[in-house]
């Protein structure tokens, strides 16, 4: 009878669900979802830390089935053999933030039961472009009904405005007859 001992493998994968580049207007929250999968052959802990975050910005790392309350820039959690966990990275960009294009880095590594780093992953990078400006309004002229430029009365004119909220993806069309 032969017995083989297999060395523990502490490997894991990281997959960002969504884009790693966003444009926002302050104040705003930016949320990223990262799937962490145990691709090794044993149970282990994963530690993640977000760095290079501008000083006044809030930052929180937490498990998706948890809460952001009390979350900080560091998260450690148990990842069982063949397990998958969803981690949320939330950045809070405060009011008054000046335009900036910055890259935030997420470092992650696996740790064995002796608290020794076993596998360090290449950092994930998230680019946040804070643009200036608030909501903008575009005037759109339109005419309702038949158009006869020589005999058009003011009652036939219609005014419309489009409200654009940069970074929010909203565009509203308001019409006044």
Image: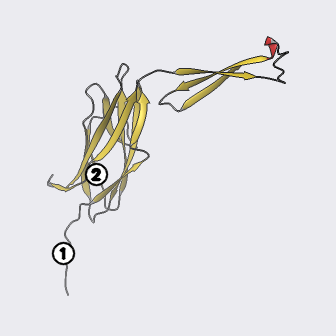
- Image quadrant holding the C terminus, namely top right
Task: Give the crowd class for mark 2: few <14, some 14-19, many >=20 residues within 10 Å.
Answer: some
Q: Residue furthest top?
A: 154
**Would residue 140 be found to the left or right of residue 131 on screen?**
right
Of helix, strand and loop, which one carries label 1? loop
Q: Is residue 170 visible?
A: yes
Q: Above or below — where is 63 with respect to 9?
A: above
Question: From the viewer's perspective, is 56 left or right of 134?
Answer: left
Residue at 36 percent across and 19 percent down: it is 96
| Residue at the (28%, 43%) spot, across then down | 106
Residue farthest front in this picture? 150
Secondary element at tag 2 = strand
Residue 5 drawn at (x, y percent): 18, 75
| CB-based contact (under 8 Å), mark 2 and mark 1 | no
- Residue occupying image coordinates x 19% and y 79%: 4
Q: Which residue has dot 1 on it?
A: 5
What residue is shown at x 36% (from left), y 25% (from top)?
99
Say above or below: 39 vs 3: above
Is 14 in front, or is 132? Answer: 132
Mark yes or no: residue 68 visible. no
Residue labelled with disc 2? 78
The one nearer the camera, 152 or 38, is 152
């Amino acid at each position: 009878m032969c017995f083989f001992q297999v060395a523990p493998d502490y490997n894991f994968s990281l997959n960002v669900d969504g884009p790693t580049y966003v444009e926002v207007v302050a104040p705003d929250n930016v949320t990223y979802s990262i799937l962490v999968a145990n691709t090794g052959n044993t149970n282990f802990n994963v530690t993640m830390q977000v760095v290079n975050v501008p000083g006044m910005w809030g930052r929180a790392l937490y498990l998706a089935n948890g809460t952001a309350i009390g979350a900080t820039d560091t998260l450690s959690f148990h990842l069982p053999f063949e397990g998958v966990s969803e981690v949320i990275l939330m950045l809070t960009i405060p009011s008054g933030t000046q335009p900036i294009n910055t890259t935030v880095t997420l470092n992650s590594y696996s740790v064995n039961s002796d608290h020794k780093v076993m596998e360090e992953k290449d950092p994930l990078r998230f680019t946040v472009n804070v643009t200036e400006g608030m909501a903008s309004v575009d005037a759109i002229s339109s005419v309702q009904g038949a158009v006869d430029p020589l005999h058009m009365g003011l009652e036939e004119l219609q005014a419309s405005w489009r409200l654009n909220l940069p970074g929010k993806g909203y565009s509203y069309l308001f019409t006044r007859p």
